[in-house]
Image: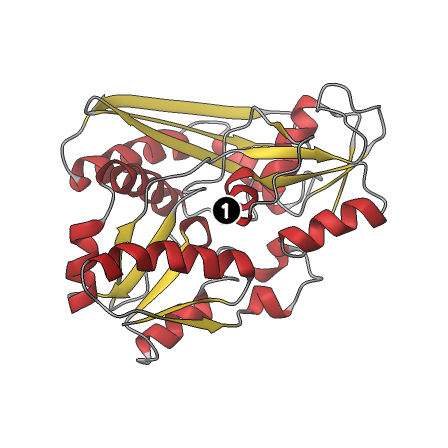
């Protein structure tokens, strides 16, 4: 079974993590790396790619063309609606979904001096950071995790924001990193297997998927589908399962951090369909809220008045 993936060190590690349960089930697995648009263009801001898919679309296309039996993604990079003929077959247990602040000189978010330069290319992270510290300067930064850590040492940044799960998977978590108290991007920290719908690997994936993580992912992806937002919108969401109860919280933030709309829901679920309906219901509450259109318009204009 050929598993397609990005060619970065982190992506290859994630593909091997997905391959492990398949090999334990007696299958031979080959990891097949592919370059993506997001990998080839390491300079443009991520929002300029037009939404989610910069790191997954060409891999999904190759899967449809028969270049592999499955594809391994960071689920946050996969559009909330799979391409026709493809489906989300399995997810691994969710790892740390949060972000960390990595400073150049031992600071935390609270102790960074006013005017400090913080690097991130995520509109969500930028908005959340400015909401907490409007006196900071947030600057664009691109590259894989080792590249961004190198830029922190050599460049103009006083700190950068990185994903905790990626640093831990690579084994390069800096000792001075500190957790940020922000909601993550939807499906952050989840490794996913995409396959042709109804294929042998799809059926195997459904048998090995991590049940609670799968339900949380279903709720978060359903919420995204209902709202139609991409990574250019400062939107965050996180679902948790405990004792058969799903809690789902989400927020949209003004790009400059000046306003936040936060909503949540909680209730018992017993199936993927229940999780999907929970996400749809919360999405309906967001889209019908008087502040939703205002914040969505602000996101489209980068916080500037149209």
From the top left corner, tell me how far across and down residue 9 is, in percent. 55, 60
Secondary structure under the numbered disc 1 in the rendered image: helix
- According to the picture, the residue beneath numbered tag 1 turns out to be 169
In the image, is residue 125 above or below residue 154? above
In the image, is residue 68 above or below residue 284? below
Binning the other alpha carbons within 10 Å of mark 1 as few (below 14), some (14 to 19) or many (20 upward) gives some
Residue situated furthest top in the rendering: 110
Q: Residue at x 27, y 65 (%)?
A: 195
Q: Residue at x 25, y 38 (%)?
A: 215
Picture quarter containing residue 186?
top left
Q: Looking at the rendering, in which quadrant would you find the N terminus? A: bottom left
Picture quarter containing residue 218?
top left
Q: Is residue 111 visible?
A: yes
Colour logic: secondary structure
From the top left corner, tell me how far across and down residue 213 is, in percent. 29, 39
From the top left corner, tell me how far across and down residue 18 is, in percent. 34, 56
Q: Looking at the rendering, in which quadrant would you find the C terminus? A: top right
Closer to the camera in the image, 52 or 110: 110
The reply, left or right, for residue 241 in relation to residue 48 is left
Q: Residue at x 15, y 52 (%)?
A: 207
Closer to the camera in the image, 5 or 286: 5
Q: Is residue 81 visible?
A: no
From the top left corner, tell me how far across and down residue 5 is, in percent. 43, 66
């Amino acid at each position: 079974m050929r598993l397609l993936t990005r060619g970065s060190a982190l992506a290859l590690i994630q593909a091997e993590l997905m391959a492990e349960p398949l090999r334990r089930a007696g299958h031979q697995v080959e990891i097949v790396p592919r370059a993506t648009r997001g990998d080839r263009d390491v300079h443009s801001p991520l929002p300029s790619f037009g939404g989610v898919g910069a790191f997954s679309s060409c891999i999904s296309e190759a899967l449809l063309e028969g270049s592999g039996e499955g594809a391994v993604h960071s689920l946050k990079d996969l559009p909330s609606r799979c391409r026709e003929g493809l489906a989300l077959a399995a997810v691994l247990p969710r790892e740390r979904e949060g972000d960390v602040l990595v400073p150049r000189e031992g600071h935390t978010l609270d102790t960074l001096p006013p005017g400090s330069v913080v690097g991130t290319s995520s509109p969500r992270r930028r908005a959340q950071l400015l909401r907490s510290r409007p006196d900071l300067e947030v600057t664009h930064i691109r590259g894989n995790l080792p590249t961004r850590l190198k830029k922190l040492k050599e460049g103009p940044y006083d700190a950068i924001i990185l994903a905790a799960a990626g640093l831990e998977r690579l084994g390069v978590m800096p000792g001075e990193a500190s957790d940020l108290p922000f909601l993550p991007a939807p499906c952050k920290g989840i490794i996913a297997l995409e396959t042709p719908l109804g294929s042998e690997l799809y059926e195997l994936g459904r048998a090995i998927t991590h049940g609670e993580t799968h339900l949380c992912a279903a709720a978060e992806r359903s919420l995204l589908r209902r709202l139609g937002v991409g990574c250019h919108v400062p939107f965050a969401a996180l679902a948790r399962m405990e004792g058969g109860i799903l809690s789902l919280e989400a927020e949209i933030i003004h790009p400059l951090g000046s306003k936040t709309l936060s909503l949540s829901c909680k209730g018992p679920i017993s199936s993927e369909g229940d999780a999907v309906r929970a996400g749809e219901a919360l999405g309906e509450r967001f889209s019908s809220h008087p502040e939703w259109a205002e914040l969505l318009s602000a996101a489209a204009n980068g916080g500037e008045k149209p």
